[in-house]
Amino acid sequence: MNFYQKDSTEILKELNTNLENGLTSNEVNKRLEQYGSNSLPTKKATPFFIIFIKQFLNPLMFILLIAAALSIILQEFTDAIVIVIAAMLNVIVGFIQEFKAEKAAIALQSYEATYCKVIRNNKTETIDAKDLVPGDIVLIEAGNKIPADIRLFDVIDFKTDESILTGESKPTKKQIEKIDKKEIISNQNNMAFAGTYAISGKAKGIVVATGMNSYLGHIAELVEKTKEESTPLQNKIKRLSWWIGGIMVGITIIISIIGLIKGMPFHEIILTSIALAVAAIPEGLLVAVTVTLAIGMQRMLKRK
């Protein structure tokens, strides 16, 4: 990935290609077998109902649902409705956030180019960008989506929008000279990267990386491999939930034993234990946490 530190002559020799003639059809076929298609792997979206069901799989949610069920048994319907609303608010917020995260990897595929112009067999051709291979000579004009990582060797007032990779909204002006020192991607101004856009001028360059070997492919791989980890707040809420659940069960057992020792009717013991359990459950906790986080988010947005 250090092609920006090499001049065009060195890269042409390394990739065994030619500026005027480009690659031959036979060579393209060989390289397609070697490097594979110039595309990102298709990520299958998780079904909505799976994402929805996952929102119920946490200790506090279990406790809330148990509390709702116990409230119905005690005919405390108002409490049951409040608890269910609190639980559903948490489910809805969690579903929306996870759905957005799920779309992140899929959205990367929209940045893939569809067609591009190349020099092959000593003539200019328009090809499907998926058939692009390292060593291809690509012609780029304003408005084109960059189809692969390309080392530029001829530019005319050429600028690109690289905000998808760098977050920088200003256009990047390109040049062709090699860069001697190691640079981050935003400073590799003799390169054009897959997924970015040409917003002015013209350019010609050599494809140096395609598909998952491109910088965009590297990002897609990181997104694909990223494991979901609980935040410290989520971990604390889970621990609190288990503590509450444990204490609730413990108190229920103690009350039941005391009631049996004193000879209380079994039905009365059960009702008393259920009432204590419902009272011990903080059904408003999820709503309180959600509202607090929402207020914090609004403050962050105002401060940009």
Image: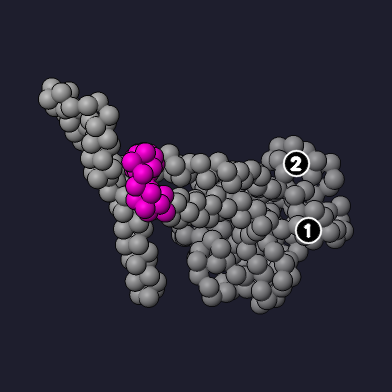
Q: Nearer the viewer, residue 253 or 204?
A: 253
Magenta span has 61?
Answer: yes
Q: Residue at x 75, y 54 (%)?
A: 129
Which range of residues does the magenta coloring cover? Answer: 59-86
Considering only vertical position in the picture, is 54 above or below 90?
A: above
Q: In the visual, does 191 lie left or right of 137?
A: left
Whether label 1 touches label 2, CB < 8 Å: no
Q: Amino acid at mark 2?
A: Leu
In the image, 288: left or right of 208?
Answer: left
- What is the secondary structure assignment of the residue under circle 2? helix
Most common SS among magenta residues: helix
Q: Position of residue 28 (x, y in %)?
A: 79, 44
Q: Earlier in the sequence, mark 1 or mark 2?
A: 2
67, above or below 120, in the image: above
Using the image as rendered, state which of residue 18 and residue 210 is in the foreground: 210
Check disc 1 and report the residue beneath it: 115
Residue at 46% of width from left, 45% of height from top? 55
Using the rendered image of the protein, determine whether residue 19 is visible from the camera's viewpoint.
no
Q: Residue at 57% of width from left, 66% of height from top?
A: 162
279 inside magenta stretch: no
Residue 81: give x, y in percent of width and height: 40, 52
Q: Is residue 6 left or right of residue 12?
A: left
